[in-house]
Every structure is written in structure tokens, then in C-alpha cells.
Amino acid sequence: MDERKEQDLEDVMRSETRRGKRPIDMAERRRRTELQRDFRFLLENGSKEEFVKAIRAPGLSEGSAQFEQALTAWNETRGRQK
């Protein structure tokens, strides 16, 4: 089965198992997963400037708690690699 059909099948199966529960926004879930994957890659391989640019893209502003948590994660990850 090609990847698109597999993804569609997984989406249908997931929605069927969630009948009667709050619906899941699959497009948002995929977007979040892709962002996490990109952030993880930058944590391990990118510069601090690239990482800051990437965390600003979805709307995090400097000084926000999430922005500071992301920078703390970057600093801790990079500190371990040295």
C-alpha cells in the first residue's frame, strides 16, 4: 500500500476508535509532529540562530514561557554535546 493510502487508513482507524469522544484535528496533529521533528533536528544539529528563527515561526515570542523553555532545552542539549 502506498504511503498516502496507509495514512488515510490510519486516520480512519483512529477516528473510528475515538467515536463518542472529542474529535482530533489530524492536520494540526501532523503539523505539530513535523514541527517537533524539525525542532529536534535543530536541537541536535543547528545553530542557536537557526533554532530561534524556527521557534519564532509558529508564533512564539521572546519572553514567553514556551520560548524560554525552548531556549533552555537548546542550551541544555548543546551543553551535553560539548
Image: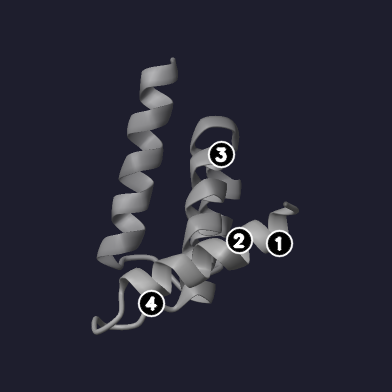
* Percent position of residue 30, x then y: 53, 64
Q: Is residue 61 visible?
A: no
Residue drawn where x is 44% and y is 15% of the image: 82
Left or right: residue 75 compared with residue 54: left
Task: Tell which tag, 3 or 4, sits nearer the viewer.
Answer: 4
Tell me which numbered mark, 1 or 3, is placed earlier along the sequence: 1
Residue drawn where x is 31% and y is 74% of the image: 18
Q: In the rendering, which numbered label is found on residue 4? A: 1
Tell me which numbered mark, 3 or 4, is placed earlier along the sequence: 4
Relative depth, front residue between 74 and 35: 35
> Amino acid type of disc 1?
Arg
Q: Assign a secondary structure to mark 2.
A: helix
Q: Assign a secondary structure to mark 4.
A: loop
Relative depth, front residue between 54 and 34: 34
> Amino acid type of disc 2?
Gln
Left or right: residue 35 compared with residue 78: right
Q: CA distance from mark 1 to mark 4?
A: 19 Å
Which residue is labeled 3 in the image?
A: 41
* Percent position of residue 70, x then y: 36, 51
Q: Residues within 10 Å of mark 2 (few under 14, many from 20)?
A: few
Which residue is labeled 4 in the image?
A: 24
Residue drawn where x is 56% and y is 68% of the image: 57
Q: Assign a secondary structure to mark 3.
A: helix
Q: Is residue 75 visible?
A: yes
